[in-house]
Image: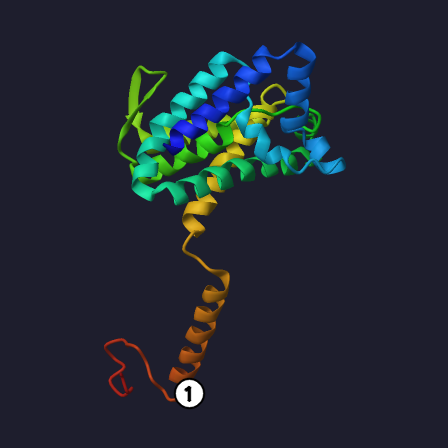
Amino acid sequence: MTLKALIGANAGMFLITALAPAPIGRAIIDNFGLVPAAVLHQFAIWQPATYMFLHGGIFHLVFNMLALWMFGAELERKWGTPYFLKFYFVTGIGAGFLTVLFSTLPFGFAQQVQHSVVIGASGAIYGLMLAWAMIYPHRPIYMYFVFPIPARVFVAIVGAIAFFSSLSEAGGVANSTHLGGLLVAYLFLTGANMHPLSELKYRYLKWKINRVRKKFDVYSGGRANDYDRRVH
């Protein structure tokens, strides 16, 4: 049901922009697509969220929605709807903000992104793809619908393509967002169970325990020739 709602929202926004008079459709794209310069200088802070529901053409929409269904359906069943939605939006919005950050780098290939309009759900979908590959690393994915390769290899390939494409002025606009989706997804999945305060508390207690052990000459183990030490 959640996937149907997401696909329906994307398809609905595509129809609105496609069927509306050209000036209105263009205005929707310009105002709700992601323009890093507008976020930085005009405080258009809604754009890193709204850009996910806009697409530039029927094939752009179809391929993104097909990937959303392919990877999202199984992940939603495994995670449950609340966690799936949280992951989807954190990844997509995070990819948007990383694109804005990327555009501030002092390089030509990055700064040209500032005034470009980034649209599409690809940032979130690349995140779903990474999550799927981390959970099912050996499942085959048909690259170009022809060549079966393990999921982890597939994601490594598309990640490398996104990285190197983001370094060129021609490919930087979309690919920096794809790369951002992969990065946010990885950080989300690997850091989901790590609470900073709990981690600091654990490290502090471990340090105190080690100090007490050394003070009272208590060791957790020793070499074979440490026969004269008290081992507890």
Amino acid on which disc 1 is placed: Lys
Q: Give x and y (percent) for residue 183.
A: 49, 39
Structural crowding at the residue carrying mark 1, measured as other residues with C-alpha within 10 Å and reported as few (<14), some (14–19) or many (≥20): few
Q: Give x and y (percent) for residue 65.
A: 42, 22
What is the count of numbered marks? 1
The residue sitting at the right extreme is 41
Instruction: Work out whether 2 lies above or below 200.
Output: above
Write the residue at 36% across / 26% down: 69
Quarter of the image where one finds residue 215: bottom left
Quarter of the image where one finds residue 108: top right
Q: Give x and y (percent) for residue 154.
A: 36, 28
Write the residue at 40% across / 35% down: 130
| Residue picked out by circle 1 | 215
Write the residue at 45% across / 37% down: 88
Instruction: Work out whether 168 lies above or below 152.
Output: above
For label 1, the SS is helix
Name the image colouring.
Answer: rainbow
Which quarter shows the N terminus?
top left
Nearer the observer, 7 or 95: 7
Write the residue at 46% across / 60% down: 195
Q: Is residue 122 visible?
A: yes
Position of 170 with respect to 206 (left or right) is: right
Which quarter shows the C terminus?
bottom left
